[in-house]
Amino acid sequence: MQKLNFTRSLAGGIAGAFTRRQAAWCVAAALAASAAVPALAQSSTLKIIPHSNITVLDPIWTTAYISRNFGYMIYDTLFGTDIDGKIKPQMVDKWSVSKDGKTWTFTLRDGLEFHDGKPVASEDVVASLKRWASRDTFGGQLAKVTDKYQTPDAKTFVLVLKEPFGLVLEALGKPSANVPFIMPKRVADTPGDTQIKETIGSGPFVFKADEFRPGERAVFVKNAKYKPRAEAPSGTTGGKQVYVDRVEWLIIRDAQTQMNALINGEADILEQPAFEQYASLRTNPDIQLIDAQPAGNQFIFRFNFLHAPFDNEKIRRAAMIAMGQEAFLKTQVGAPGLTRYCKSMFPCGTPFESTNTGDYSGVANPQKAKALLQEAGYKGEPVVLMRPTDLAAIAKLPLVAKQQLEQAGFKVDLQTMDWQTLVARRAKKDLPSAGGWNAFMTSWTSSDILNPLTMAMMNAAGDKGWFGWQDDAKLQDIKTQFTKAATEADKKKLAEQAQLRAFETVTHVPVGQYSQPAAVRKGVSGLVPAGAQVYWNIKKQ
């Protein structure tokens, strides 16, 4: 995997403290003492407004970022990716590779323990990796060349390959969805297409299932038995130090109510402010903007390959040509300095960025799209386009897509729902008229789409692929060649081939690049830029 060119210049340090009313001298000493108790308790509780509601607690079953973020709270990983894109060990203490590059031996570090008190063992790791590989694009490529796993003892696991695979550590240390989180074997034995029933990890926080209220809050407490690494935190690597006793995710769906809660001190971090709120937040002396995803994000439009009309490549191409990035970025973001036109599938500013995009220009051309649509024999089938109304970061995108597609001659059935319903529905292969779908829109952090192996939309393995279920042996073969590339120049060439093939078959449409910094109250420090949203290392005064 190529080096992540994360931007190091953040929005400055976070300092200061919450403003509090000073106790009047006339207040009785007993009342003043009793008031001090909730104040101290408050300082040990970090309150976060996440970017969406959470109902799916399985970060392997879905690529939804809220589930990934949940995973980082309670699970740990074998390796991680630091701020410079380097892979470093986490749960692993040491490892070695045979001379022929086909046998990888790993030893777990001491003190790893699941939240139920049982030690983490090599059999837990193997079961977790197998389940992850059944769902993840990168993991699937690794699984294809894996001959067998061995567990010679409780702390050692061995990966025996059929042939050398130069990206083993990059796969095991990938920072974003799907992340190879380690679960107990009894949990990891759950088939990948079935959601897990237990949420037991070995990570820095323990999930309070008894306090979980979907649509209201999720609660985590510090894992007192967790043993952080000694290194400083960097990306998803290093010491996962926890300085608060409790973390509460407050599920607030209305954007204005979210901002009010932050400004009034009822929340400490607003993960993704509405784009129109940035102008006001920048002028608020109690708020600091911190970019925890400094490499940026990309909006995309995804097709369902199983059903008409998008089972027809020409019709997908017509839809692609109908879409232009300017309208998406202006409508959804609008805020100055936060957007970037980028027609490359691999984010602009990253190693595999390429302007070689075939028919795709990123500029809407409704006349050309209409002609192609007629040539393809479009019969007026309605396009069921799902729109999440409660996820402000992408809620306006489908409105733009509907307008641009209709200008090209498509009939669009825009169906609104909350994000968690969309996440569940996009996993269904039913006919659109029977509860299925034709298209949806989402966004990806750059760390997820840096190369052909990490990009879910390039998972063209049919039923085993990402939602949309494209089946394209040629694209899969290019990805396999990518895993064997010996030089950076060869990887660059193959990444471009994969992109051209993806545009040729129209896997998806990139509709613009953007940034969305978190809003953080002063007095809260230590938010780690990671290519994923992580909440260790944070101190609250």
Image (spheres, helix red, strand yellow):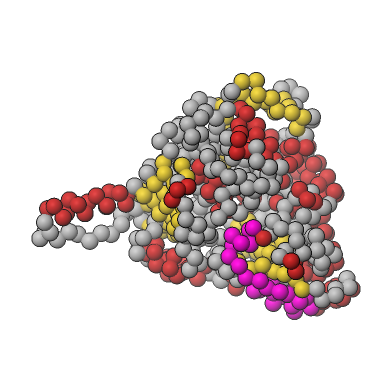
Magenta stretch, main secondary structure class: helix
**Residue visible at 39% across and 64% down in the picture:** 261
Residue 394 figure quarter: bottom right
Residue 73: x and y in percent read 50, 45
Residue 55 figure quarter: bottom right
Is 153 located above or below residue 486 in the figure?
above
Whether residue 58 sits left or right of residue 144 in the image: it is left
The residue range painted magenta reads: 397-424
Q: Is residue 472 magenta?
A: no
**Residue visible at 82% across and 66% down in the picture:** 308
Whether residue 409 sits left or right of residue 450 in the image: it is right
Q: Is residue 417 magenta?
A: yes
Residue 417: x and y in percent read 61, 67
Residue 87 figure quarter: top right
Is 435 located above or below residue 185 in the figure?
below
Whether residue 243 sits left or right of residue 182 in the image: it is left
Nearer to us in this view, 37 or 515: 37
**Residue visible at 36% across and 49% down in the picture:** 45
- Is residue 122 among what the camera can see? yes
Residue 50: x and y in percent read 49, 57
